[in-house]
Amino acid sequence: MTGCLTKGSGANDYVVTDQKSGEKVPFGGPAELDKYVNQTVKLTGTMAAQGSDKVFKPQTINQVAASCEKAK
């Protein structure tokens, strides 16, 4: 999944907004992800069901661009 990484509501909560679908996918991650906030990143990982919610479990992160493209 490639998209814009932003901070979530909690200390280790993040949200990635998918570049293609515009879907916002929240996930928990380590504080090291702070250095990628407000950047376009490529995340790889798995989607898991947690109750009725889908939860993204990231495994790798790579910077694609130093900023987020604003959706038109």
Image (spheres, helix red, strand yellow):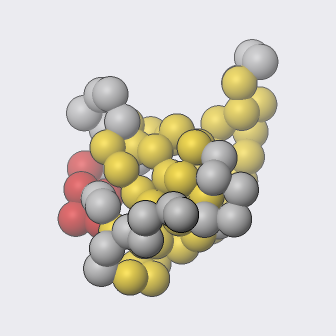
For residue 22, above or below residue 14? below
The residue located at (65%, 36%) in the rendering is 55
Answer left or right for 44 relative to 37: right
The percent coordinates of residue 27 (x first, y second) are 51, 41
The residue located at (22%, 65%) in the rendering is 35
The percent coordinates of residue 37 (x first, y second) are 29, 59
Asked if one can make out residue 43 in the rendered structure from this viewpoint, the answer is no
The residue located at (50%, 52%) in the rendering is 16
**Foreground pick, 47 / 18:** 18
**Which corner quadrant of the image does residue 2 belong to?**
bottom right
Asked if one can make out residue 69 in the rendered structure from this viewpoint, the answer is yes
For residue 42, above or below residue 53? below
The residue located at (38%, 82%) in the rendering is 65
**Farthest front residue?**
72
Answer left or right for 44 relative to 68: right
Answer left or right for 4 relative to 35: right
